[in-house]
Image: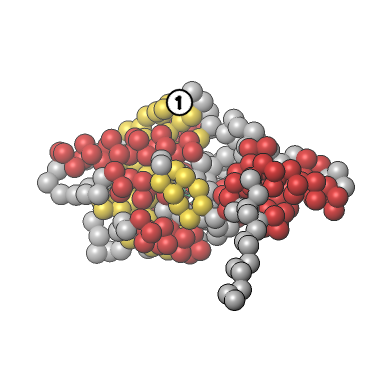
Amino acid sequence: MKPRPHPRPRPRPAPALLARTLAALRAELGDDPAVAAIAPADAATLAASAGGDALRLKRWLKRRASGEPVAHIVGHFTFRGLSFAIDKRAYVTDPELTHLVDAVLARAKALRAAGRRAPLLADFGVGCGSLALAIRHHLPAARIVGLDLDPDALAVAARNATAHRLALRLIESDLFDSWPTTLRAPDLIYGDPPWGDATTLYETTERPAGHYHAMPPVSAFPLGGRTGVHAQILRAVARLGWHSEIWLNGGVLPPAELTALARNAGAADFAIVTPAPGLSLLRCRMHLR
Ligand SMILES: C[S@@+](CC[C@H](N)C(=O)[O-])C[C@H]1O[C@@H](n2cnc3c(N)ncnc32)[C@H](O)[C@@H]1O
């Protein structure tokens, strides 16, 4: 007689699994405020991704209660409809960056229409590669070089580029120090450099200051003040004599602060663009053509 196959335990539906696992956590930890503070939406995302595995969900809820971002725990996030692998080696892209991608895509398309060659773009602080790959996905003709101080983030970007089958040249570099001498100056430079401090956060309860403190140390808060890295970028471009158009995310920094930054760095031409209420992008050139 054939042995009867072992019946596989059916994965529990996520809400039931979550209720049971939260009860198990409470039994273990008592009424710990960090567990109580897990946002219901985060708990639901973790439960939905746990594949019916109660032990995994319990581990994940403890990590979330300790402050790890949900994307780092589940290992992926979605930006502009594309899925990106992520882990604690790289910054989790803020959804507000979709406005920068829109602006860069519009300008890169215009550059392509105006010129005879594919536009060359430099992604400053490429992180996990989400912005560059979203741009390349919509504009395959663009050549993009992603720069980052952090080799761990570059490893995550390389993995995402492979997964999306999109070419992306990645270079470990402080500012533009390691820009290849064989390449011309980029037509367009863009990025979300670290900016602000614990008092300048996106207006959302899902990403308090702790969310940013859980990111890789060089990725969230800048050296040299709230717009320190922006200023370093502008000065580096000025020193290099590049005519590149520059687009930098300013997040929720007041437009007056970005204006002062551009003036102090000696921008030849600049504007503060407001893609949505309370959000700013800095567009500038350090040298006119
Ligand atoms: C806010 S994160 C943005 C990452 C990615 N662009 C995104 O939107 O998800 C800033 C990135 O800038 C990089 N970075 C910080 N200082 C840098 C520097 N001096 N030169 C190059 N990259 C730098 C960090 O390692 C980090 O990946």
Residue 136 visible in image:
yes
Residue 160 pos. (x, y %): 41, 57
What residue would you read off at disc 1?
276
In the picture as drawn, the residue positioned furthest to the top comes out as 277
- Identity of the amino acid at label 1? Ala
**Structure colour scheme:** secondary structure
Image quadrant occupied by the N terminus: bottom right
- What residue sits 31% from the left and 56% below the top? 166
Q: Is residue 180 above or below residue 190?
A: below
- What residue sits 54% from the left and 42% below the top? 195
Q: Residues within 10 Å of mark 1 (few under 14, many from 20)?
A: few
Residue 216 visible in image:
no
Q: Secondary structure at mark 1?
A: strand
| Quarter assignment of residue 286 | top left
| Residue 284 horizontal side relative to residue 37, left or right | left
Residue 85 pos. (x, y %): 48, 55
Residue 243 pos. (x, y %): 27, 45
Q: Is residue 260 above or below residue 8?
A: above
Any atom of ligand 1 within 8 Å of the CB at mark 1?
no
